[in-house]
Image (cartoon, grey):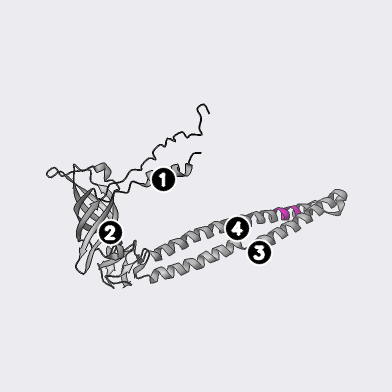
Amino acid sequence: MTDWSGILGWLVTVTLAAPPATEPQLTVDGLVRLVEVVDVPARRDGRLEKFTVKEGAYVHKGDALGRLDDAEAQFALKRVEVEHQLAVEKANSEITLKSARLIEEVSRNEFQRARQVKQSSPSSISTSEVDRLKLDAEKATNEVARLTEEKRFALLTSQIKAFELESSRLALEERQLVSPLDGIVVALHRREGEWVHVGEKVIRVVRIDRLRVEAFINLQTGLTQLENAPVVLEVGFPDAPVQEFAGEIVFLNPEADPVNGQIRVWAEIENRDRMLRPGQRGRLKVFSKKPAQPIPAVTIPPTSDTKPGK
């Protein structure tokens, strides 16, 4: 019998025997820089009423940083809210239309009865009376049509007021200064009480949870192996041992320096515990991407109980 368990064990051993590369492909000096810097602008003209943060505050995306004077926008929003509510209630009201339909039904019944009487006994009711009842029925029908059209117009008006309501809310939100990313407030460009115009820079926020490392690599290096290659940045601290920060290459400059034949590369790294600061330098270790190893083919040797031809 063939010892399949032994062959399977040998196959797994061959497949997992090759360890991943632990030696870096190259090591270069790296400079830590910011990935994202945002100067939050004013989205409306107005007086800068209040800041809700100070320099050095850590903020999350969507956090309020301050606001412009929004008293006028508050009043406008309340007015549009009432107008929208009034338009919705008018569009949903059925009292007038129901009354018109009842009148239409009564008018049509009176006209039908008068016409039947006129047909069975012509002298019992005048032709003018039948015509008057017919006119009343048609007026009632037209009134129902007019009120139905008014209800449709009221519904469209309520939809317009809904858009105006959203616009008023947006106008109020645009007077808020909101952080576009997770980061630290590093500068307040203006002061409370100052008048700012739309587009003017008010607050600077920088992202520090993920940083960029810039380095220069010789053009003779295998560039194809550097794309998205894993990296480790080693940085020394005065009061702590050398720390390592993992990341990967995200950019290879297509232009090389004609003097020294070097290209600039960027790697993005996770700033663990926010230990790193832009401007620090360290040693950037770049590792090769290990291609997937194919599983070697296995030839099963014949055993004593395997006969030729079977």
Give the residue at the far left of this rendering. Answer: 259
Q: Position of residue 144 (x, y in %)?
A: 66, 56
Q: Quadrant of residue 292?
A: top left
Residue 193 vs residue 308: left or right? left
**Closer to us: 139 or 199:** 199
Q: Residues within 10 Å of mark 3 (few under 14, many from 20)?
A: few
Q: Residues within 10 Å of mark 2 (few under 14, many from 20)?
A: some
State the SS at label 1: helix
Q: Is 136 colored magenta in this rendering?
A: yes
> In the drawing, what numbered circle is on residue 95?
3
Residue that carries the numbered disc 4 in the rendered image: 151
> In the drawing, what numbered circle is on residue 245?
2
- Magenta segment boundaries in residue numbering: 133-138
> In the drawing, what numbered circle is on residue 269?
none
- Find out whether the residues at labels 2 and 1 contact each other: C-beta distance under 8 Å: no
Task: Write the residue at 58% across / 65% down.
Answer: 89
Residue that carries the numbered disc 1 in the rendered image: 12
Residue 40 vs residue 219: left or right? right
Of the image marks 4 and 2, the number of the one nearer the N terminus: 4
Of the image marks 2 and 1, the number of the one nearer the N terminus: 1
Task: Write the residue at 40% across / 68% down.
Answer: 73
Of the image marks 4 and 1, the number of the one nearer the N terminus: 1
Task: Write the residue at 80% across / 51% down.
Answer: 127
- Residue type indicated by callout 4: Lys
Q: Is 264 colored magenta in this rendering?
A: no
Task: Write the residue at 43% across / 70% down.
Answer: 75
Of the image marks 2 and 3, the number of the one nearer the N terminus: 3
**Closer to us: 82 or 218:** 218
Distance CA(mark 4)–CA(mark 3): 11 Å
Distance CA(mark 2)–CA(mark 3): 72 Å
